[in-house]
Image (cartoon, helix red, strand yellow):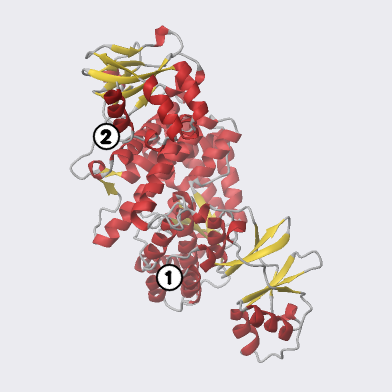
Amino acid sequence: MADALDTTREFLNTLAPFDQFEPDALEFLLPRLETRFYASGERVTDPDSGPAQRFFIIRQGRVRGETPSEDEQISGKAWELVPGESFPIGALLGRRPVHTVHRALEDTICLELSVEDFDRLRGRSQVFSDFCSRRLASLLERVHQGLLTRNLGAAGSGQLNTPLGARIARDPVTCAADASLREALTAMRDARVGSIVAVDDERRPVGIFTMTDLLGRVALEELPLDIALRQVMTPDPIALPDSAPGFEGIETMAEHGMKHICVVADGRLVGVLGERDLLTSHPLTLDRLVRGILRADTVATIAAHLREVPRLIGAVISQGAEADQILRLITRINDHATRRVLALLRQEHDIEGIEFTWLAFGSQAREEQALKTDQDNGILFRCDKGQEDAVRERLLPYAQAVNRALDECGFDLCPGDVMAGNPDCCLSGPEWERRFGRWIDQGTPEHLLKSSIFFDLRAIDGDREPVEALRSQMLRKTAFNSRFRRQMAANQMSFRPPLGLFGEIRSGAGGVNIKLQGLTPFVDGARVIALAAELPATRTHDRLDQAVSAEAMRANDARDYHAALRYLQMLRLRTQQQALDADREDSNRIRPEELGTLEARVLKEAFRQARKLQGQLAVQYQL
């Protein structure tokens, strides 16, 4: 008996989540597990047997889950579970029968726990309870933390997801806005800090003054030291609540090109944080990168700064940022680069007096750009009726020059020519409205497959109001056109997760394209749901959240989709980093066999979730 328990202990210690069980929970579990043999073809569970009564851990062999009364070989609604996987957690939690027959695919041995002991174990083990309630997210956290520990050590990991208040190490240096500049500089010197915050009588921040301001606004302008601080400070500084995560501070700095942020509690100043307080493990600063882009006087200079982005992102990953946060940060930096290119080239072209907005489509519009990306952009311009061709003729040389400059900066030219330099993507507001109207009312499935990228759009530079008006009109039309939505849903099935008939990952000679076969089903599926429910969000994660709020998606499903999507996004980032380091072109391809056991398990589950989303849309639109 003791030998059997020791053998089971060794087996469980190799599996998540059991390898992190609390000692008393593991001692509770071990003697209550029963070992049972199932011959090949024998049913392990059956929907007709009533509410689930046993929790199974596969010790040896394979188990197939198959949908009753259907030919699973044709339907594809079968999947395979291998040693280390467990089931049927959902049925046990819901006190319901299983939805599928679980059948031994070969001679199989399972470790089994009664439903009563399953419940008692959840009460004893927070690890097990967390795993049962948020299975995929729990496994994903294990993968993420394991990568941090293995590659960079545990020190400092995760700090970008800790509250800003926890990063404050000293009281802020403050003064009144009417204090003299001399008084402010004296306080900064005595405290040995590079910034001072002007506060009102209730300690609310009303301005900030830094050493950069001293050089640019005081020394170079030769201003006297007895002037009031309010004359040279930056008024209305951006402040974040002390409960905000560290990454929000980094993102805010990137968006506004700042070195410091104020931290407040109930509106009152409690601290000031610089980038070094949040990103401590890398000499490359976000501030230097962003300011370098904003002040660049040539396209080549912008390109040189952008080549530093992968190193910066490596530092951000090392400190625990989530994948969607990192993609937003990359997009923020790319937005700055785009706006700077637009500004530099504007003076070289005859476009004075033309009102236009530079548009982003696709991943830039969704704020989901990875380290390697191509261009998807356009122009929306304003003009009098009948002047469209004349205005377009003036804008196109400028747009084409911008496209070439962005290509020089590392944003590849779009293979499908979805670029502002293409006359079809340089349109007036009414022309864009008519184009979207044709797609929605008359588009063929093939046309919509090529145009789906346009339904993610965001203003990058220029007036945002016409873009929002275009988006609102588009959403009204899509919500009331069922034929269009059905065609978009059918197109969403074009890129299928690489799972075989029994749920195994199928990897070709070149590996798996993680973008097309993993991420695209989630991006396209969330877009269809957003267009159907008139959801204004553009980011995929925001669309999932808004779908739950609009009762267009169940909260539990959205939770699993979030977890799967974040894992696939992080896996793509890692793959692109490795490709850049090795100077390879296949920056979106992975080889599942090179992943560890836990990651392979998470990857398979992420693909299953993508299949699940596609299946839900197939049922909804009768595809």
Q: Could you tell me how far apart the alpha carbons at marks 1 and 2 are, in whole angstroms? A: 39 Å
- Between tags 1 and 2, which lies in front? 1
Question: Helix, strand or loop at disc 1?
Answer: loop
Q: Label 2 sits on what residue type?
A: Ile
Q: Tell me which residue sits at (59%, 38%) in the image.
A: 476
Question: Counting residues from the N terminus, which is met first, the one under dot 1 or under dot 2?
Answer: 1
- The residue where tag 2 is placed is 505
Q: How many marks?
A: 2
Q: Is residue 602 above or below residue 612?
A: below
Q: Quadrant of the N terminus?
A: top left
* Residue underneath mark 1: 284
**Residue 502 appears left or right of 423:** left
Front position in the image: 69 or 601: 601
Give the residue displayed 37% in from the left and 57% down from the top. Answer: 152
Residue sticking out furthest to the front: 2
**311 up-or-down from 162: above or below:** below
Q: Position of residue 379 (x, y in %)?
A: 49, 59
- Above or below — where is 360 with respect to 18? below
Residue 323 location (% of width, % of height): 44, 50
The amino acid marked with disc number 1 is: Leu
Number of residues whose C-alpha sits closer than 10 Å to that of mark 2, classed few (under 14), some (14–19) or many (20 or more): some
Quarter of image, res 493: top left
Which of the image's four quarters has the C terminus? top left
